[in-house]
Image (cartoon, rainbow, N blue to C red):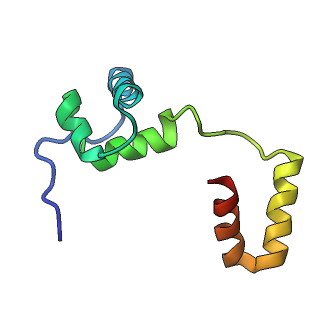
Amino acid sequence: MVRPPVPDAMKGRWTPGEDFMLASYVHEHGASNWNLVPRNTGLERSGISCRLRWMNHLNPDIKRGKFTHHEEQIIIHYYARFGPHGYCRQLVSIVF
């Protein structure tokens, strides 16, 4: 099923005001049902755009920066044990 495009949806850079509106909405209502976010906040963005902005830029739980030595050792261990495809699934099951 193909979704129709969002009419008059903005493209391009997010403004600080849009970031604030999105972050406020997610803190109040939680990070779910992204298709309702633009409708409930008045943002002229698609639900997918809102989800990506939250997940990649605004979510305070995302750790940015280098891996610690301990984290590197965990990755090396699981990569050696399960190979390039299996270690990802094992790390996800450990972390989440």
Residue 14 sits above or below residue 35 on the image:
above
Q: Is residue 17 above or below residue 83?
A: above
Query: Of residues 23 and 7, which is closer to you in this image?
Result: 23
Q: Count how many numbered circles sit on residues in the image.
A: 0
Residue found 76% across the figure and 78% down from its top? 82
Decide if residue 51 is on the left or right side of residue 88: left
- The image quadrant where one finds the C terminus is bottom right
Q: As drawn, is 38 to the left or to the right of 73?
A: left
Residue 5 location in percent, x, y?
15, 54
- In which quarter of the view is residue 40 placed? top left
Between 34 and 9, the one lying in front of the other is 34
**In-image side of 92 versus 56 (left or right):** right
Q: Residue at x 29, y 46 (%)?
A: 33
Relative to residue 81, is residue 68 depicted above or below?
A: above
**What residue is shown at x 33% (from left), y 20% (from top)?**
17
Q: Residue at x 41, y 40 (%)?
A: 53
Q: Position of residue 90 (x, y in %)?
A: 69, 68
Residue 49: x and y in percent read 33, 45
Query: Which quadrant of the figure contains the N terminus?
Result: bottom left
Residue 89's spot in the image, x, y percent?
A: 64, 69
